[in-house]
Image: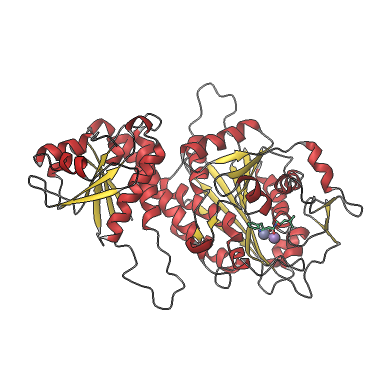
Amino acid sequence: MDFSISISASPHQTKSPALAVGVFTDGVLSVAADAIDRASNGAVRAVVKTEFTGRVGSTLVLRNLQGVAAPRVVLVGLGKQAEYTPRAHARAEQAFAAFCVQARLTEATSTLAAIDCPTAPVRDRARSAAAACGEATYHYDASFGKPDLNARPKLKKLTLQFADAADRAAATQGLAEGGALAHGMSLARTLGNLPGNICTPTYLGEEAKALGKQFKSISVKVLERKQIEALKMGSFLSVARGSAEEPRFIVLHYKGKPVAAKRGAKTAATGPIVLVGKGITFDSGGISIKPAATMDEMKYDMCGAASVLGTLRAVAEIGLPGEIIGLIPTCENMPSGTANKPGDVVTSMSGQTIEILNTDAEGRLILCDALTYAERFKPAAVIDIATLTGACVVALGKVNTGLFATDDALADALLAAGKQSMDTAWRMPLDDAYQEQLKSNFADMANIGGQPGGAVTAACFLSRFAKAYHWAHLDIAGTAWRGGGDKGSTGRPVPMLLQYLINQS
Ligand code: BES
Ligand code: MN
Ligand code: ZN
C-alpha cells in the first residue's frame, strides 16, 4: 500500500478512479462535496435530498458526473456534524477503502482527512486515514492452497487531498506515520493469523532477522536454547521443555537518531524504552490442558510478540529518534513427558522460585525472565504486551486492553496514546493486597492466585520481576484477535504503542 498527499482546492478537476467526499447528516456537505455539487450542477445535493442520509460509514457512488474529472465520486457518510469524532472519520475512510476494494480499483483519492475535526489535528487525521485504509485492505491468504486472486485487494495507492497548502507538512508527517502503522499492523496481523505449525518460535526468530535485514536501524540477536540456559532463564525454559519446538529469545535493538535534548533538561540521556512481547506460538495449557472448543485460537498467544515486531517495523519505517529494545521470549506450551507438572518448582533468572500450580499460567513464566533480562538496558520504561488472562476478557471484554502500571506518568501516557490512536486501554489496579493471593508453601510465589481478580494477580506476579524500572503491562487477551465467523487478528495494540513512542520522541 502506497500513500501520498495532493493539494487542490478544485476536487472536480482531480483525475482519480474514485474520489471520496464527506457528507454529514441533515444535508450538510463538506467543502469538497460542496465543490463537486457546484461543478456538477447540484448532483450531490439532489441525491442527498432523496436517498443519501449521511449515516456514518455509509457510501453512495455517483458515476460520470458532468463537470467532474473523476469517473466515480463516492459520497461517504460522516454522521451528525456536531458529533463528528476521529472515530467517525476513521469509519468513513474505512468505508471508502472497502468500496474501492469491492470495485477492484487500484488507486483512489480521499478528501475526508481534510474535514475539520475538533479533537484531531491534520497530522492525526492523516495518520488515521492511512491506518483505516490499511485495516480495510488487509487480506490474509498465506495458508491457502490456491490463494483467491479475486479476493485479494487491488487497491495499492491512496492519495489524501487537502485544499490548503498550509496543511501539507502536517499531513505528510501524519501520512508517513500512518503508512508505517498500516505496515506494522499488517505484519502483526499476519503473524497472529498464521497457524501454530508454521509460526513457530524458530519462524518468529527468522521474521525478526528479516526485519533486521530490511532496516539498517534494527539489529537482531536470536538466542537459542544453549544461550538461554546460560542466562539461567529457568522459568522460561521450564515452559519450553514440554514441546518438540525449540525455544528462542529474540532481542531487537532499534537505534534512531539521538533524541533532541529538551531545553533545560539536566540529564542528557535516559535509557531506551523496552517492549516485551509474549510469544507463546501455541498454548495448549500444557498438563493443565485446555478444553478443545476454541483451543485453536491459542495460536494467537503470540500476539504480544507480533505487536512488538509490528511496532518496531513501524518505528524503523518512520525513523523515529531514540532507542527502543524489543524482547521476545517464544516457545510452545505443550503437554508431554518432559512438560511442567502442577506442583513443580522452578527457579527464575532473578533467583526467585516459582511453584507452578497450573501449567496453563505459562505466559507469566516466560515473561518474568524477559523482564529480568530487561534490567541490563537501564531502561527509561519497560512495557510488556501479552495475551495473558481470560480474566481480563471477563473484566473488560473486547473493547479495552487491560493496562497495569507501577508508574502513573507511564500509565497516563499510554492511556492518552490509546485514545489518540483509537486503540484504547483501561487502567486496572495493582494494590499490594492482591499479592497475598500468590503465596506458596513451597516456593517464593505461586504462578496463580485463584479465580478472583485473575488479570490483577497475573500482573502482580509480573510486578515482582519489574522492580528495577518504570513498568507497564498490557493484557491484550480481549483485544488482539476476534473469534467467531470474523476470526482474525486485529493488530492491536500496535496503534497505541506506536503513538506512545511517537509522543515520547
Ligand atoms: N493465553 C492464555 C490466556 C487467554 C485465555 C487469552 C483465553 C485469551 C483467551 C493464558 O496463558 C492462560 O491460559 N491463562 C489462564 C490463567 C489461569 C490458569 C490462572 C487463564 O486465563 O485461564
Ligand atoms: Mn495458558
Ligand atoms: Zn497463554
Residue 37, image x and y in percent? 14, 39
Residue 33, image x and y in percent? 20, 39
Q: Taking 499 as reference, is 70 above or below it?
A: below
| Residue closer to the observer: 44 or 182 | 44
Q: Is residue 35 left or right of residue 292?
A: left
Q: Is residue 123 left or right of residue 371?
A: left
Farthest right residue in view: 441
Residue 258, image x and y in percent? 49, 38
Q: Is residue 177 left or right of residue 226?
A: left
| Residue closer to the observer: 190 or 79 | 79
Q: For the image shown, how many numbered marks are present on the structure?
A: 0
| Residue closer to the observer: 259 or 290 | 290
Q: Is residue 31 left or right of residue 502?
A: left
Farthest top residue in view: 264
Residue 484, image x and y in percent? 53, 62
Q: Residue at x 77, y 58 (%)?
A: 235
Q: Is residue 372 visible?
A: yes
Quarter location, residue 250 = bottom right
Q: Residue at x 50, y 62 (%)?
A: 487
Quarter location, residue 349 = bottom right
